[in-house]
């Protein structure tokens, strides 16, 4: 069973998932601080290169399984055209109305 994106508790994380699922790069980028960082499976990655490859050029999308930490931690099935589907964990650092860091990896 998936949790509807509209029901995610944190409005910034909800907007992030909405923009990612819509493949809306301008909306996605607008949600990140200028110096935002990210990691994948515990290794810091270049955020722009990673999102180009894993999200925008490969039709990335998230089906939310659960949330915790006030909506700033998610477990989701992440699917893209390169890797197919995998169960992933996401953790977000939110500053005001933007995300300064997100971490993802297999759950």
Image (spheres, rainbow, N blue to C red):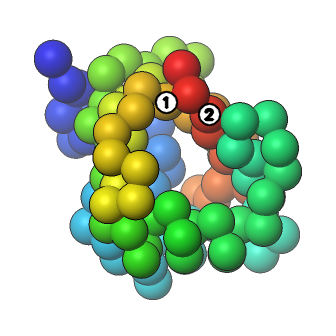
Residue at the spot 27% in from the left edge and 37% down from the top edge: 63
Going from the N terminus, do you reach mark 1 or mark 2 first? 1
Disc 2 marks which residue?
A: 105
- Establish if 31 lies above or below 9: below
In the rendering, at what x and y percent does residue 60 appear?
36, 59
Q: Quadrant of residue 52?
A: bottom right
- Label pair 1/2, CB-CB below 8 angstroms: yes
Question: In the displayed structure, does residue 45 sit left or right of residue 74?
Answer: right
Badge 2 local density, few (<14 within 10 Å), some, or many (20+)? some
Mark 1 residue element: strand
Mark 2 residue element: strand
- Establish if 44 lies above or below 51: above
Extreme residue toward the bottom, this view: 26
Q: Is any atom of residue 17 visible in this view?
A: no
Which quadrant, please, contains the N terminus? top left
The residue lying toward the viewer, choosing from 66 and 61, is 61
Residue at the spot 67% in from the left edge and 75% down from the top edge: 48
In the rendering, at what x and y percent does residue 80 appear?
35, 55
Residue 22: which numbered mark, if any? none
Which quadrant, please, contains the C terminus? top right
Residue 88: which numbered mark, if any? 1
Question: In the displayed structure, does residue 91 sit left or right of residue 81?
Answer: right
Q: Is any atom of residue 3 visible in this view?
A: yes
Q: Quadrant of residue 20?
A: bottom left
Residue at the spot 41% in from the left edge and 50% down from the top edge: 83
In the rendering, at what x and y percent does residue 54 appear?
51, 62
């Amino acid at each position: 069973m998936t949790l509807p994106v509209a029901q995610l508790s944190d409005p910034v994380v909800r907007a992030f998932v909405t923009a990612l699922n819509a493949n809306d790069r301008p909306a996605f980028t607008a949600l990140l601080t200028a110096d935002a960082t990210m990691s994948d499976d515990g290794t810091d990655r270049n955020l722009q290169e990673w999102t180009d490859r894993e999200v925008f050029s490969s039709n990335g999308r998230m089906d939310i399984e659960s949330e915790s930490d006030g909506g700033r931690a998610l477990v989701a099935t992440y699917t893209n055209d390169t890797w197919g589907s995998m169960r992933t964990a996401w953790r977000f650092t939110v500053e005001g109305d933007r995300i300064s860091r997100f971490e993802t990896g297999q759950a």
